[in-house]
Image: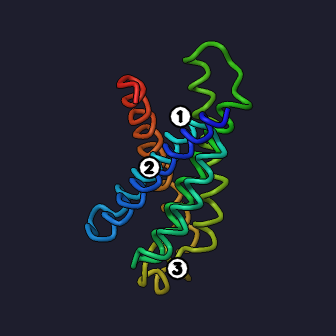
Amino acid sequence: MLLNSNKALAGVSMLSALSVIVLMSGAYFFTNTFFFTALAAYLVGYSVNKYNLKYGSMQLVVCTILDAFLNPDKVNWMLYLALGSYLIICEWIFRKWNRIVDIRKKMRRQLVYNCIVFNVMYIPVIVLFQEILMGEKAKEVLPENATLCVVILWVLGQVGWLIYDKAYRVFFQTLQRRKL
């Protein structure tokens, strides 16, 4: 038991180091910041699947703290925390609530659960923090078209979520095929 615990801790430490390197890469290649942040969050999901929720959560907390201290872009750590938390919650739901035997039905139901989790996290952000999502010009446009802006942000968020979720599934399936 102790050997497995030490092995898991060493594996999560290596994944955490890789996550921080990937997050720092996003700080220096500004055009790919979201890509690098999502990739680092995928490593949290991988650690949850390979070890367990406790170690994945530990990796998320450690990497978020390091990203907050080391990254010059201070909004990036919040994005990383949101993406990593989303994956941890979805993996927890997949393990605890989704008890369907047929894999196709199970994955369809998981997609519905993931959509619910995403919208529970995303809708308060688009309602409360529109200026951050839309930039400086939002203050001029928002008073006139606030509802339209929220709807546009919600639709764009759904498209982004579908891409993010599908990319995570492909990432995880690729790692499973390679048995890493």
Provide residue 12's location: percent of width, then percent of height.
51, 47
Q: What's the residue type where badge 3 is placed?
A: Leu
- Tally of marks: 3
The residue identified by callout 3 is 142
Which residue is located at x 42 percent, y 53 percent? 40
Q: Which of the two discs, 3 and 2, sits closer to the camera?
A: 2
Whichever of labels 3 and 2 marks the residue nearer the N terminus, that label is 2
Q: What's the residue type where badge 1 is placed?
A: Lys
Horizontal arrangement in the rendering, residue 30 relative to residue 76 (left or right)? left
Q: Which of the two discs, 1 and 2, sits closer to the camera?
A: 2
In the displayed structure, 178 sits above or below 101; it is below
C-alpha span from label 3 to label 1: 45 Å
Q: Badge 1, how many Cα within 10 Å: few under 14, some, many 20+?
A: some
The residue identified by callout 1 is 50
Q: What's the residue type where badge 2 is placed?
A: Met
Horizontal arrangement in the rendering, residue 97 relative to residue 123 (left or right)? right
Please identify the quadrant where the C terminus is shown: top left
Horizontal arrangement in the rendering, residue 76 relative to residue 174 (left or right)? right
Provide residue 156's location: percent of width, then percent of height.
45, 56
Whichever of labels 3 and 1 marks the residue nearer the N terminus, that label is 1
The residue identified by callout 2 is 14
Q: Residue furthest bottom?
A: 140
Which residue is located at x 35 percent, y 66 percent? 24
The answer to which quarter of the image holds residue 8 is top right
Q: Badge 2, how many Cα within 10 Å: few under 14, some, many 20+?
A: few
Provide residue 170's location: percent of width, then percent of height.
39, 33
Q: Secondary structure at mark 2?
A: helix
C-alpha span from label 1 to label 2: 13 Å
Q: Secondary structure at mark 3?
A: helix
In the displayed structure, 109 sits above or below 62; it is above
Provide residue 82's location: percent of width, then percent of height.
56, 59
Q: Considering depth in this image, is 127 or 163 the residue closer to the camera?
A: 163
